[in-house]
Amino acid sequence: MISNWIDKLRRESFTRRYAPHQLDAPLLAIEGVSLQYETGSVLQEISFTLDHGDSVAVVGPNGAGKTTLFKIIAGILDPDQGIVQVSGHEPGGHTCIAYVPQRNLIDWSFPATVADVVMMGRINKMGPFFWPQANDWAVVREALDFVNLSPFAKRQISELSGGQQQRMFIARALAQEAELMLLDEPLNGLDMPAQEKILEILDTLKGQNVTVMISMHDLRLAEEKFDKVMLLNKRLLGFGPPKEVFTRERLLQAYQEHLHFVGGEIDTLAVSDECCHGD
Amino acid sequence: MNIIDFILTPLNYSFMTRGLTAAVLTGIVCAVVGVYVVVRGLAFLGDALAHSILPGVAVGYLVTGGAQEPLFWWGTGTAVLVSLAIGAISQGAKIKQDTAIGIIFAGMFALGIAIISTVKSYTVDLTHFLFGDVLGVSSGQLIIIGIFSALILLLVLVYYKEFLVLTFDPTLAVTLRIPVKTFEYLQLVLIALAIAVSFQAVGVALMVAMLITPAAAAFLLTKRLPVMMILAAIIASLSGVIGLYFSYYINIASGPAIVLTATLIFLLAWGYSGVKKRLAVRGNRG
């Protein structure tokens, strides 16, 4: 009785009402989005549409605006111009968008277990206080199972390897029941097997109709593993199948002097980005 | 003297029972709120906030002619105002946050001392404000401490999950559409209230120890936030009780006795976690 009342009070006073999904609208529609910081323009006139179940690798040099684009889509930043719509409404009304931050932005000494962090994805779906119900635990268990982390559920989060930490965040996004996952350079600093595992998991998500945008630096991996890629450097330089997007001309436009063609073909190009710590 | 006499004798004095109750209550409140201070790395902010309430308390002292009970309201008002001001300054100002906090901290503290220095019994009153006097808590003050302690703990409990997400990953809080700014201010206000409640017990100078020492000791002993809160509350209560007995039997000031006990417990926790880690490493090797 009291808990119902408190829950009602919280929803009405603090929490915005969530936007209903418009079924005929595309999952994500972006039209003419621009953002400028004091230091200069970050994104210019970005427009594209994504459908349910799309899986897109976003590539571009450091400072290309990948993180900024993700944050705008997630409703964390507001664009200066342009319209962002997720299932027909602005992102600020949705809780179905999961943004997975770069790993180095998280305090890994935080006193929480892996299961605790995954449970954080469900706080909107729980009643008042922090009393996860049986179905919340079931969702968390299922999510951990999906990313093969069940044996680690009770570990402190700093005990995980880099790849496991990323998988934990994917599990949290699943627990959040996200329809759109934005993964900000999840492969950074991981060895090949760990990268492969994450890409496998993302591949399985396609079958569940979850839309994924992932920013990355490895063009070859993007080409091999994704049907659609997005080439970004402040402007949208290409969006579509890798063969069409990764042309010599467009890549030069994106990477400029950092791009060296070792052979004559795309598969022998080399990109030298000074560092890979994101933008 | 046997152990039972050792424990019961001080309880014959009503100032001791009131002091113990106040020390335990304020200890629990500071420790629970202090968990957020420790995990968010806000120790300096906590220290600054504690010192910043001095001018408010000083003005109250002058206005009411030295009465103790109204001081709580003056302290609370100032603490909440300063916490909101710090919150506003830290939202996208050019000056770095710790610099801004330092400026407010020193300025307010100086203002407080300046105001108190106009009173004749200057040093006596100042000592009282700086280091507290938990044994001087009246029944009326104890009731106020009790009510506010309950209010603070209730807010922490009701908004536990919002604070949890905000503290661990603010971007997740945004995508879950939690009103981040509101809760950031609420967290600051909770710290401010905890400080105002504990002002009488330990004074402004040692307040930061109440906020961070039990929470830091608990941090070393657990890997889960709710457990850390409970452990911090237990450590703070123990520090309050043991500290006051020390104060009674070896005749040292009550505030420092409580803080020294908490520090000792922290050192024990630190030693224990070090040994545990070393054993774990050895276990892995073997």
Image: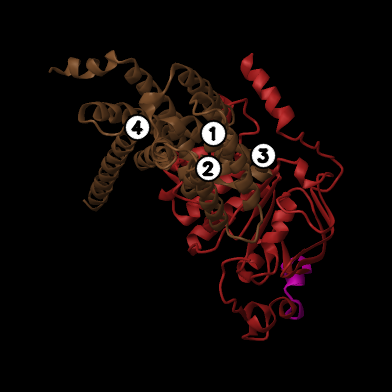
Chain colours: A red, B brown
Q: Is residue A5 left or right of residue A21?
A: left
Q: Secondary structure at mark 3?
A: helix
Q: Earlier in the sequence, mark 1 or mark 2?
A: 1
Marks 1 and 3 close (CB-CB < 8 Å): no
Comparing B36 with A98, the one in front is B36
Splitting the image into 4 quarters, where does residue B236 fall?
Answer: top left
Provide the chain ID for the residue under circle 3: B
Discs 2 and 4 share one subunit: yes
Q: Which residues are magenta?
A: A236-250
Q: CA distance from mark 2 to mark 4?
A: 36 Å
Marks 1 and 2 close (CB-CB < 8 Å): yes
Q: Which mark is residue A163?
A: none
Which residue corresponds to the image point at 29% horizontal and 36% vertical from the top-left? B261
Q: Identify the residue position indicated by label 1 in the image.
A: B62
Marks 2 and 4 close (CB-CB < 8 Å): no
Q: Earlier in the sequence, mark 1 or mark 4?
A: 1
